[in-house]
């Protein structure tokens, strides 16, 4: 179990982490979610004893990391944001080095072999780390964290900079590791947290904005829902007519989707279905309803609202309902996976090109 009590880290006058407290139970995968600069790495660096805190307590399986750092650190495998790799070593040399550094007591050969099988780096075992793809480098970083078989793994943005295929591989691996280890994983990608983690802490500007199970965050808390209607007619008139419908909280004309035709984003009170009334009133004015769909707030919306400092009724994302034959899929949901993709041509495929270079 990891217990964090009133942790604060101050850089000059700036509080990078501001009096946060949380616990992580054994066997859970906790997602640490927040935008850049939220304080994720700072917290992880303190949890692992890599930097000191300004104030607060960290207990790792009951051991205070300040009182007995060696004992506490033995419990933890850490993959920092930038993996601490020695590029001029082969994977084998590096893992041997880490094994010695950690004064690992497990049988060397068998243990390193197990780790390599687990993170799937056997085929690059004798390669120079410098020549590995980013995906493989990340797995070597994970191997390093796993040496000594620590019960707790702390992984700082383990999928950043990887291509989508590598991301899925690393996520699958983390889920697998979560069966035997307690894992804290940081990410700024919601879908990643949803896919991998049991619990979520949303952190923003050094403060915890939400702390719950992933399931609860995505499911329990209900909120006002939203309709998106595409209507052909006079914009000003349409806004007035929609506003007058009972249950409507707000309405805005979104973008001009087709010449002179707008999407109207309508926020509706909880448990109010205005679709029929809306349709009738539109038709009564001889306008044309070109599309209508209802969406509920997604974790993405919640996250944005929280991190933008709004208070919010948190809610579930239920199936979106399309009552249109148009292709509205594009605005159904913000696909955060896009962020995962990068231009890096450093893929597993390219690996073969460099394979020969380090043969000598
Ligand atoms: P995250 O990992 O969530 O992106 P960080 O923990 O790296 O965020 O940073 C939190 C805040 O602390 C940021 O505003 C960052 O600029 C600041 N910060 C981090 N490290 C230092 C440092 N060594 N000196 C000064 N400010 C720092
Ligand atoms: Mg960071």
Image: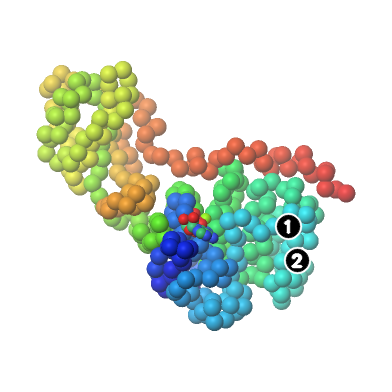
Position in image of residue 257 (x %, y %):
33, 24
Q: Residues within 10 Å of mark 1 (few under 14, many from 20)?
A: some
Residue sitting at the far bottom: 67
Residue at point 78% right, 52% down?
128
Q: Secondary structure at mark 1?
A: loop
Of the pair 14 and 328, the residue shown nearer to us: 14
Of the pair 243 and 53, the residue shown nearer to us: 53
Residue sitting at the far front: 12
Q: Residues within 10 Å of mark 2 (few under 14, many from 20)?
A: some
Position in image of residue 231 (x %, y %):
24, 24
Q: Is residue 201 visible?
A: no
Horizontal side, residue 261 vs residue 176: left or right: left
Of the pair 334 and 271, the residue shown nearer to us: 334
Residue at point 55% right, 40% down?
341
Task: Say whether disc 1 or disc 2 marks the residue closer to the N-terminus.
Answer: 1
Quarter residue 71 falls in:
bottom right
Circle 2 sits on which residue?
A: 97
Circle 1 sits on which residue?
A: 86
- What is the number of the mark on residue 175? none
Horizontal side, residue 329 vs residue 71: left or right: left
Label pair 1/2, CB-CB below 8 angstroms: yes
Position in image of residue 29 (x %, y %):
49, 62
Residue at point 50% right, 42% down?
339
Asked if residue 216 is positioned above or below residue 325 in the image, the reply reads: below
Q: Secondary structure at mark 2?
A: helix
Q: Is residue 320 visible?
A: yes
């Amino acid at each position: 179990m990891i217990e964090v009590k009133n942790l604060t880290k101050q850089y000059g006058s700036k509080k990078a982490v501001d009096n946060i407290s949380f616990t992580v139970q054994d066997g859970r995968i906790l997602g640490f979610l927040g935008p850049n600069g939220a304080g994720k790495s700072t917290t992880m660096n303190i949890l692992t004893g890599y930097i000191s805190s300004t104030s607060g307590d960290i207990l790792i399986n009951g051991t205070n990391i300040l009182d007995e750092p060696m004992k506490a650190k033995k419990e933890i495998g850490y993959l920092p944001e930038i993996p601490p790799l020695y590029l001029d070593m082969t994977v084998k040399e590096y893992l041997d080095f880490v094994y010695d550094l950690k004064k690992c007591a497990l049988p060397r050969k068998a243990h390193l072999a197990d780790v390599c099988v687990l993170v799937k780096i056997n085929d690059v075992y004798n390669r120079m780390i410098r020549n590995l793809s980013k995906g493989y480098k990340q797995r070597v970083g994970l191997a390093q964290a796993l040496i000594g078989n620590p019960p707790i793994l702390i992984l700082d943005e383990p999928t950043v900079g990887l291509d989508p295929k590598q991301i899925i591989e690393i996520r699958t691996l983390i889920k697998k590791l979560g069966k035997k280890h307690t894992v804290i994983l940081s990410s700024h990608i919601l879908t990643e947290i949803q896919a991998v983690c049991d619990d979520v802490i949303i952190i923003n500007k050094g403060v915890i904005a939400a702390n719950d199970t992933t399931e609860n965050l995505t499911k329990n808390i209900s909120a006002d829902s939203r309709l998106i209607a595409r209507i052909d007619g006079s914009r000003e008139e349409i806004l007035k007519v929609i506003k007058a419908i009972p249950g409507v909280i707000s309405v805005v004309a979104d973008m001009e989707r087709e010449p002179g035709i707008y999407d109207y984003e309508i926020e509706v009170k909880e448990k109010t279905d205005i679709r029929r009334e809306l349709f009738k009133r539109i038709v009564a004015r001889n306008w044309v309803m070109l599309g209508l769909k209802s969406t509920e707030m997604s974790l993405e919306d919640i996250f944005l609202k929280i991190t933008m400092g709004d208070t919010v009724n948190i809610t579930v994302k239920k199936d979106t309902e399309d009552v249109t034959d148009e292709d509205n899929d594009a605005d159904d949901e913000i696909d955060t996976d896009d962020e995962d993709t990068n231009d890096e041509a450093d893929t597993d495929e390219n690996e073969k090109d460099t394979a020969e270079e380090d043969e000598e």
